[in-house]
Amino acid sequence: MGNNCCATSDAEGGEVTVNKSVKVSDMVESLHSSVASADQSLIEKLEGTVWVRKSDGNPMARIERAQVIWDESFKSANSSLSSNGTNVLVMNIRDKEKSYSFSGEVNLSAVPMTIIWSDGDLWVKK
């Protein structure tokens, strides 16, 4: 079923009204594309430099290509990073036996930028 369109005009005022029917699947695809774009935009803003723990200044990780690349002191595999298009991140950590998920709230307006993780850890962008 394609898009339908009809138009009506107001003979006196010369105004034309156009009504267009759109497929729901097209609207859903557009919404998913917008969320994916917002997700990528947030993560891109976090990339490129070292993130340190505010409490002690120890380096934690870098963020690159939607991955948390842990500081070598952690001897840990990279962790995946995603966002739902808001300022909230989800980090998935996997070790040999278990998987863990942490959410983090990004403060883009803080100078320097910060992430407050669900376990209470506060990271600062260097």
Image: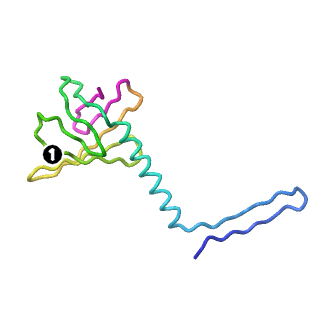
Q: Which residue is mark 1?
A: 77
Residue at 18% x, 38% y is 70
Label 1 Cα neighbours within 10 Å, binned few <14 / some 14-19 / many ≥20: some
Residue at 35% x, 29% y is 113
Residue at 22% x, 35% y is 61
Q: Position of residue 3 (x, y in %)?
A: 62, 70
Q: Nearer the viewer, residue 46 or 15?
A: 46
Relative placement, left or right, of 30 versus 117 is: right
Looking at the image, residue 53 lies above or below residue 93:
above
Looking at the picture, which amino acid does disc 1 mark?
Answer: Ala
Relative placement, left or right, of 120 versus 72 is: right
Residue furthest to the left? 97
Q: Which residues are magenta?
A: 111-126
Q: Quadrant of the N terminus?
A: bottom right
Disc 1 element: loop
Q: Position of residue 53 (x, y in %)?
A: 22, 28
Looking at the image, residue 15 lies above or below residue 77:
below
Q: Quadrant of the C terminus?
A: top left
